[in-house]
Image: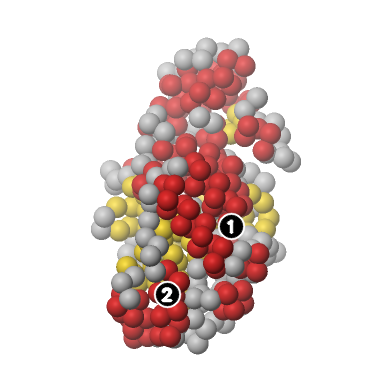
Amino acid sequence: MTEQNTQSKGREPWIHLYGLTLAELRTWLEEQGEPGYRAAQLFDWMYKKRVTSVDAMTNLPKALRNVIRERARLVTMEELTRQVSKKDGTTKFLFRLFDGATVETVLMRHSYGNSVCVSSQVGCHMGCQFCASTLGGLVRNLEAGEMVEQVLACQRMLDQEGQRVSSVVVMGSGEPLENYGATLRFIRLITADEGLRIGQRHITVSTSGMVPAIRKLAEERLQITLAVSLHAPNDEVRSRLMPINRAYPIAVLLEACREYWEKTGRRLTFEYALIGGINDRLDQADELADRLRGLPCHVNLIPVNYVPERRFDRTPRRQVEAFRERLERHGISCTVRREMGADIAAACGQLRAGYELTEA
Ligand SMILES: C[S@@+](CC[C@H](N)C(=O)[O-])C[C@H]1O[C@@H](n2cnc3c(N)ncnc32)[C@H](O)[C@@H]1O
Ligand code: SF4
């Protein structure tokens, strides 16, 4: 039996079709006593025609459709809410999963294409001080198929406009490298030729800095971008903001990043949320530049999103610009991330947190 079935503890033994590769789907069909060649037809309905019901798969025999309906599931998530930004078209979805847990997905509309921000876990237990996703701790890992479904839900919305998902960032709730197997499987599924065919170079995985997993990922030699949430120029500040820094301090983390670059040839991205009075002084920009010197990388500066439970101040716009200029003067490539969907609420994780509160 396929790997994903054994992952899914605590649910009825049905197979999630979006969690399977084409070869695995073929094997599964054969195990059900059905011809394996039907897998390609099924995949076509799933990924090219993107139907949401097995009944719509009209070129499959009725008996086969019955087998699939009884023993497998196609769509496992229900859309609870959809908010569309009037400013920039950013769309935030809140989904209910098969077990009642909820996750967020965000579709961002850029001039250069459409990007989906995927969640990798329900909640998170990493405890970063500025992040809403961790407020209720970790509920569970997402399965690969549930991550694929997030992308497909956005693609179905884009289908109405004749557009496609051009890039994927695993930057929603959760620490993807803690859910390593599912994240890797997800990447393989969405890049597959017979699936959505999203190029590896259009995929970014963001991590809080799980050093052993970064090393393991480097060995896979994928062409994805690794984004590392750094947020501080030294261990004192980073350990206050991110408990993981006590296990893997900055020097150890940057060493793993260098290894990632050496093995994959991919430039690193560092995420740096500017928090007023904590990590946004110009001498801290100097210190950050010192640490990153010689490592092929790009820094994304993000004025911290307000999380009511945390009460961190946002760095004023002028100071953000000064910080960026200082880094650039040191030769560090750097951008200030454009705020998307500012009118539809909230830092990552807040939509779900708000929903869980009103449901409780
Ligand atoms: C929600 S995390 C998920 C991926 C992974 N766990 C990580 O930490 O990189 C995605 C990014 O959002 C950032 N982030 C979380 N809360 C934020 C906030 N309130 N303001 C700005 N960025 C935030 C994180 O630091 C990280 O760079
Ligand atoms: S920033 Fe990432 S690792 Fe930290 S709590 Fe949020 S989701 Fe988890």
Q: Is residue 6 left or right of residue 265?
A: right
Query: Which of the 4 image quarters holds residue 325?
Result: bottom left
Element under disc 2: helix
User: According to the image, label 1 marks what residue?
Assistant: 210
Q: Residue at x 52, y 20 (%)?
A: 26
Nearest to the observer: residue 293 or residue 38: 293
Residue 239: where, in percent of width, then height?
Answer: 61, 74
Q: Is mark 1 within 8 Å of ligand 2?
A: no
Q: Are marks 2 and 1 in contact (CB under 8 Å)?
A: no
User: According to the image, label 2 marks what residue?
Assistant: 290
* Total count of labels: 2
Residue 205: where, in percent of width, then height?
Answer: 47, 53
Above or below — where is 68 with respect to 129?
above
Q: Is residue 235 left or right of residue 93?
A: right
Above or below — where is 155 with respect to 106?
above
Amino acid type, label 1 = Met
Q: Residue at x 65, y 25 (%)?
A: 1
Residue 83: where, in percent of width, then height?
Answer: 44, 61
Q: Residue at x 50, y 87 (%)?
A: 277
Q: Residue extending furthest right? A: 10
Amino acid type, label 2 = Asp
